[in-house]
Image (cartoon, coloured by chain):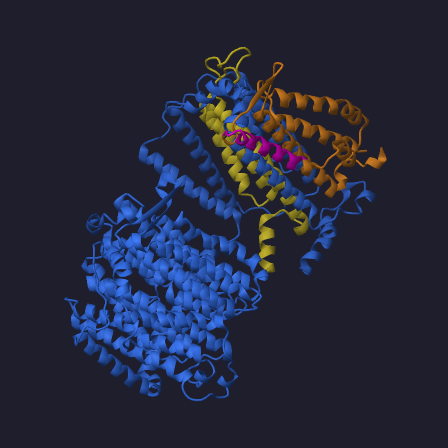
Amino acid sequence: METLIALVTGTMVAVGVYLLLQRDLVRKIIGVVVLSNSIHLLIFAMGRMTRASSPLIPPGQKYPPEGIANPLSQALILTAIVIGFGLLAFSLVLIYRLYQSRGTVDADAIIEATLGDE
Amino acid sequence: MGLLFVVFSGFLLALVAPWLTPHTGRAAGWLYGLLPAAITGVLASFLGRIAAGGTMQQSYTWVPGLDVNLSFYLDGLSLLFALLISGIGTLIFVYAGAYLRGHHHLGRFFSYLSMFMAAMLGLVLADNLITFYIFFELTSFASFVLIGFNHDEAPSRRAAWQALLVTKAGGLALLVGFVLMQQATGTFQISALLESGDLLREHRFYLPIVLLLLAGAFTKSAQFPFYFWLPNAMEAPTPVSAYLHSATMVKAGIYVLARFHPVLAGTDLWMWTVGGIGAATMLLSAWLALQYTDMKAILAYTTIMALGLLTMLLGLGTEVAVEAAMVFVLVHAFYKAALFMAAGAIDHEVHVRDVTKLRGLWQRMPLTGAAAGLAAVSMAGLPPFFGFVGKELVYKAATAFAPAPAVVTGASVLANVALVAAAGLLLLRPFRGSVNEITEAAHRPAPGLWFGPVVLAVGSVGLGLAPWLLDHAVLGPSAGAVLGATVEPHLALWHGLTLELGLSALTVAGGVAAYLSWTALHTSAPFQQLERWLGTGLDHGYDHVVDGLLAMGRWQTRLLQNGVLRRYLSTVLVATIGLVAGAFYHYGFFGGPIAVGEVTAYEWILSLLAVGGAVGTLFFRERISLITSLGVSGFSIALLFLTFGAPDLAKTQFLIETLTVILVVLILTGVSQVEGSLTPTQKVANGAVAVGTGAVVSGLVLAVLKLPFENPMGEYYAQKTYVEGQGRNIVNTILVDFRALDTLGEITVLLAAGFGIYALLRLGTAPDPNAENDPAPEDASPQSEPIESSAPEQTPQQVS
Amino acid sequence: MRHSVILRTAARLLVPLMLLFSVFLLLRGHNETGGGFIGGLVAGISFALYAIAYGTAASRAALRTTPQQLMAVGLGIAVVSALLPLLGGGALLEGLWVQWQGIKLGSPVLFDVGVYLLVIGVTLVVIYELEEHNPRLFPDVSLG
C-alpha cells in the first residue's frame, strides 16, 4: 500500500509544483493546498500504514494492544493540517486584498506594475 | 561575587542611566563616577592576591553542551587592563558630566558609556573564548553608538559605520580563529588553553589561527593598513575619544595579542608579522601626526603610533620587550587620556582645536594647562616623568633585540622624535604667548573638566619618580602572564650613563629640531604626498571597498532576486532534483521492482480519486469546478486516513476541507480570472520541473520504505500515554501533553495568522458603503470594486 | 434569492447540536477520538453556518464575544496551563492531574480547552471579517 501512496504522493507533488509555477495567484494557492495534502500523505506513508486499529487504549487497560497504527506520524500530520489551514486562510486574504488594490491576481502583471512604480 | 560585580554593574547602570539622569542635576558625572571608582576599589583589593601569584576564577554554566560558559578569570594581565578601564573610566565619567552638561541626551550618553565600560571589563576578564568574543563585539557596538552619538551629523554617522564595519570584520575573523583554536585544543576555556602552547604551535591550524587572530587584533587596535577608522572616530564627543580611542578600547587588540602571547608567540611567523606591522604602523603614524593641525587628529595619530609600538614590542617577545609593553600601556593611558581631556576642555571653551589658531590659553586655563604640560612632557619622554621610564625600557628592548637591533632601534628613535615634536605642538602652540581673538573668550573650565587631567598628570610624575611601586604589584604579574613565566622586573628612573640614555638625548634633540622646523615640514611636498597616500588615501580606499561590495550586492540582487517568485522556486527545485538524483546515482538507487502489495479495490478507488481530483485542478478554468476538484482530492485523503486507523486525522481533514471550501468560495466570488497565460515554452519547462520534483519525491519515499522500520518514539508515546499522560487517545496525548510545546508554538502561529487576517481586512479600507444597495453581486464588474475600495485606503498612505 | 428557508430552519436546529457535539469532542478528546482542534473546528463551522443562514451580525451576537478575544483567551489559557506546573516545582507543560468523584481533570485538558477556543477564534475571524469586508457574500439579513 505504501508503494501506491508513494506514487500518489509523487503525482500530487508534481501537480502542486506545476500549479505553484503559474501566473495566477489563486492557482498558486491551490497548488499549496495540493502540495500540503500530498506531504501529509507522504508523512503518513513514511510512518507506515496499517489497516490496524486506531491508536487508542481500550478502557480498563493501561497499554495499547499490539499492532495499532503509528500515533507519531498522525500527531505530526494533525499539526501540519491545522497550520496549513492558517497559512491558507492568511494567503487567501492576502490575495483578496492584493486584488483589491491592484485589480488583478496575475503575478506577472503585479510585478511589472510594482517595478514600474519605482 | 567580586568579579560578577565588576563585569555586570556597568550593564545595570546602562539600564537605569536614561531614567536617572534627569534627576541628578549637575552632579551626574560625579555621581556615576562612583561606580567605576567602586569597581577600581574592588579590583585593587585583589592586587595582593594576584601579586602573590594567585589567580581568580568564576564560572557560570551557559551552554554546557558546547563548552560555552560565562566564566571569568583574573590574572596579572587582566587585572592591569581592568584597573586601567575602571580607573580611567572614573575620571572620564566625571569629565563627561562636565563636558556634556545640559546635553539633552546626557542620560543616553552615560548609558552607552557604562555599557562600554562593562563590555570592556567583561572582555579582559573573560575566561571563555565565546564569552570573550561576545564582549569583544559588544565593545565594537558600544563604540559604534558612541562615535555616532551626534547622529544628526553626516560625518559622525560615516565614522561610526566605518569603525563598526572594520572592527566587526576583524571580530568575525577572531571568531573563526577562536573556533579553530577550540578545534585544535579541545577547549574554549582560555585559562586551560594557555597550557597548550606547544600543541598549538605544532598544529596544522597554527597559521590560520595566527592570521585570523591578528586580523581581529589589528583592526581593533588600528594597525597598518586598517588604522584609517581611528582618526575618523574623533567625530565622537571628546570624552569618548579620550576613553575608547586612546586609553581602552583600541587596547583590546593589544590585549588579544598579549592574552594569547604565551600560546602563539615564539615563532618566526609571529615575530616578523606582529613586530613588522607594529613597527611600520608606529613609524608611519608618528610622522603622519605632524601633518595635521587639529589637536584631536594629532592625538589620534600619536595614539596609533603608541598602538604600533605596543604591537611591535609584543612581536619582539623578549622579557624586556614585554615588560616595556606593559609599562607603556600604563604610560600611554596616563598621558594620552590627560591630553585628550585637555584638548576637549579647550574645544569646550573656544570651539577651536586647530593648533595654528590657538595661543595664550595658559592665561585663561592654568590648571588645564599645567596638567596638559605635565602630560605632554611625559609623552615626550623627559625625565623625571613616567614616560621617560617607559621609553628607556623600550630602547632597552630595541637594542637588545638580537635578530635586528639596528632596525628596531632606528625605527623606535625616529618614531619618538616625531612624538616629541607632536608633544610640543600640543603643548606650546595653544598655551604659550598671549591670548588672541579666538582664545580670549575662554573661561576657567568647570572642576570636572580639569579634575581628570590633573589626577593623571600628577600620576605621571609620581610614577616617574617612584616607578618601583609597580614592580611587584602590577608589572611582575602582568608581564609574567604574557610570557607564561615568572618575572621580577626592577623599574628605575636612573640607570646611569647607558646607551638608552644617549638615545633619549638624541631623541629629544631630534624632536626639538622637528618642532622648530614644523611649519616647513608639514608643508613640504613629500610629507603631504605621504599624507595623501596613507592618511586620506586609505580612507578613500575604504570607500572603494564599500562601494564595490554594494555594487556586487546590487548585481547579485538583480541576478537572483528579480522579484519573479516562479523563478526562485524553479531554481530551488531544479537544484533539489539535481542533488537528490545525484545522490540516487551515487548510492545506486534506481527503483528496482515496484511491488504495489496488497491493496483493496476500495483503497484503489480512494487513491485514484485523490490523484484525479488533484490532476483535475490543472484543467478546470472555472473557479467553482476547480474548488470542487480540490475538494474531491481532500475528502478522498480523509477517507484514506480513516481506512488506515487514523480517525482523528480523518475528522480534522474533513473539517478543514469544509472550511477551505467556504473560504475559497467567499473570497473568489470577487476575484476575476487571469487573462494572461504562460508561453508554451514556459509551460513545458514548468512541466519538466514539476514532473522531476514529483519523481524525486516518489523516489525518496520508495527509498525510505526499503529501509527497516524502527519507531522507538512512537512506541514510547504509546506505552506512556495512559501511565504518564492519563489519556487513552495516544495522538491527542502526544499533542497536548508529550509534545505540547510544539502545539503551543502551533497555536501561536494560528493566533498570528488570525490577527494578521484581521489587520489585513481592517486596516486601510472601510467596508464598501454601497454594498447593501446592490443585491446582485454577480453583476458587479470585478474591476469596479478595486477602484471603489482603494480610494480611501490610499489617503492615509499619502499622508504618512 | 440567496437566503433560504430550508437553510435557516436547518441551521436553527443544527447549530446548537453542533456546538454541543463540539464540546463533547473536546472533553472526550483525551480518551477517544476528538480533541481541541477537531472540537474547535466543529464549533467554528457551526457559527459560520449560522452566519451564512442569518448573517454575520446575528452570528456575532450569538457568539457574545469577538473572535479576537477568543483567540487571545485561548492562547492565554494554554500558556497558563503550561506555566501551572512551574508553581509546584514541576517542569514547563508537565501534566498535573486531580481526581474528583471519578472524573479526572488535568492541565493537558485545560491546554486543550485553550486550543479549542483559539481555533474557534481563528476560524471565525476569517469568516466574519471577510464577510463584513464584502457584505454581498452572505444573504442580506434585512430581507428576512
How many discs mark residues in the rendered view?
0
At horizontal 25% and vertical 52% (from top left) the residue drawn is B53
* Start-end of magenta stretch: C70-90
Direction from residue B655 to residue C5 in the image, left or right: right
Residue B743 magenta-drawn?
no
Q: Position of residue B8 (x, y in %)?
A: 44, 51
- For residue B747, what is the image quadrant? top right
Secondary structure, magenta segment, majority class: helix
Which residue corresponds to the image point at 49% horizontal and 48% vertical from the top-left? B567
Q: Residue furthest top?
A: A60
Q: Is residue B54 left or right of residue C48?
A: left
* Chain B painted colour: blue
> Between B345 and B598, which is closer to the camera in this rendering?
B345
Residue plotted at (52% across, 39% down): A18
Rendered position, A20 above or below B558: above
- The answer to whether one can see residue B548 in this image is no
Q: Position of residue A118 (x, y in %)?
A: 58, 60
The chain whose colour is yellow is A
In which image quadrant can residue B617 be found? top right
Q: B186 and B492: which one is in front?
A: B492
Q: Which chain is orange?
A: C
Q: Position of residue B344 (x, y in %)?
A: 46, 74
Q: Residue at 49% of width from left, 40% of height from top?
A: B687
